[in-house]
Image (tube, rainbow, N blue to C red):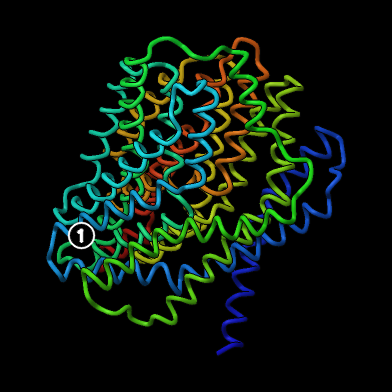
Amino acid sequence: MFKTSLTIFFGDLKNAFKDLVPIILVVAFFQALIIRTMPENLFSIVAGLIIVAVGLALFIRGLELGIFPIGESLAISFARKGSLFWLLLFAFTIGFSTTVAEPALIAIANKAAAISGGKIDATFLRLTVALSVGFAIALGSFRILTGHPIQYYIITGYILVVLITFFAPKEIIGLAYDSGGVTTSTVTVPLVAALGIGLAGSIKGRNPAIDGFGLIAFASLTPMIFVQLYGIIVYALNPEATSTITAMTEAVNEIIKTEEHFDPWKILWDLVAVIRDVAPILAVIFFFQYLIIRKPVAHLQKIAVGIMLVILGLYAFIVGLEMGLFPIGETIAFDLTAMQNNLLIYLFGFLIGFATTMAEPALLAIAIKAEEVSDGRINQNVLRIFVALGVAIGIALGAYRIVAGDPIHYYIIAGYLMVILMTWFAPQYIIPIAYDSGGVTTSTVTVPLVAALGLGLAENIEGRNPLIDGFGLIAFASLFPMITVMGYGIYAHYAAKASPKASHKKEER
């Protein structure tokens, strides 16, 4: 048993190192050939990347043992219980409790509060986003129960986002679009995916591949609506600006300042932070399991081991990022913006977007599930490559938008129109996964680097406002994967129809 577990772990570790290769190549290329300096803390960077790989391997094993089974088990139990109220309350509670403590959201909310001079309240912003995610998971669960096609909900949501954009203050638009990308955490994504797939699998007439995905897409969409409405209210009640460009610049400098040395004592706080992030999820799960469903957790020991591996994996992952990737990634981002070579900025945005997405744990979790429930029609590695390509294009285009100084909503509206158009041509099984892929790309790895690049560009380019122009890159990173994944689905569908092998099988039937 131990030998088998060890073999599986080393297999996961090998795959984790493969996922990190693109990041290492991008960082090495820019550091050696563009910046032309050797990093001072090279040993720390190498050690950090090794720890990241170990963390990824532990995290994936923990998902398989703990998070996926308990999520699917809860969904099946609620479906058998037949209580719509308790199911929707559970969905809302999971969405709210996991989002309100999401580290990426806390970071973005604090940045927004500082840069706006206190006009945007960090706590109210977090509550607004958390309420929107709770509402989203409940609405998505209701959609699975009713069997409604997901595109009707998502397209309606995009139309609402676009309409509200024309009334929202320009200071809130980029932040609202970004808030949709930071709500889905590394732990939340697998649990929510398991809930949706388990629910679809337990209801007669539902297809887990078509109906089970989509909850993450809802959780990425509704915050854009809620935060823009919040912004309209805030700026209507307090129309006078309370901060100047100088104050904003000072706030940006303070927020995105990179620590020169890694603090070993901070790793203890990282462990506490991971436990704090996972605790609300566990509290909600066990509350509903024992007090509402009133049924013990099956294979509790195995589930507990899985949850511990998830915590240890995330802990190692975050420690490794802080030791290795974040310091050098942020340094390169700011060195490039200071060099004022726009083509290099776009190239870095493209390559770092692709590389970090390939190592994103939340995307890996979704890709594993997508391959499993689609009976092999969706290859997890191909899916991840197309998602990463979408993020790469999105960040490069978003960087261009900041350099050019164009309003963000023109790009986002054009992107949503393309998503809506492609929805009508894409095969049914790829649509929910494509929508979900936009929400899983901006998590533990991507958000800090992307936020640093956007704010760094807005600070260093004359005439740019960090509050108006600095936010929005995360929105681009969430939008374009939907386009590339649907493009992949359309191509694969028509290629399969055109192939002689497919025609031969059809004749045999």
Q: Residue at x 56, y 47 (%)?
A: 357
Q: Specify whether 453 is left or right of 221.
A: right
Dot 1 surroundings within 10 Å: few (below 14), some, or many (20 or more)? many
Residue 144 x, y percent position in the rendering:
20, 55
Residue 297 x, y percent position in the rendering:
32, 78
Residue 8 x, y percent position in the rendering:
58, 77
Does residue 322 lie above or below 280 as drawn?
Answer: above
Residue 283 x, y percent position in the rendering:
37, 64
Q: Nearer the viewer, residue 57 or 121?
A: 121
Q: Amino acid at mark 1?
A: Leu
Quadrant of the rendered image containing residue 393 = top right
Q: Residue at x 38, y 55 (%)?
A: 499
Q: Specify whether 286 is left or right of 9.
A: left
Q: Nearer the viewer, residue 143 or 480?
A: 143
Q: Secondary structure at mark 1?
A: helix
Residue position marked by numbered label 1 in the rendering: 87
Q: Residue at x 42, y 44 (%)?
A: 183
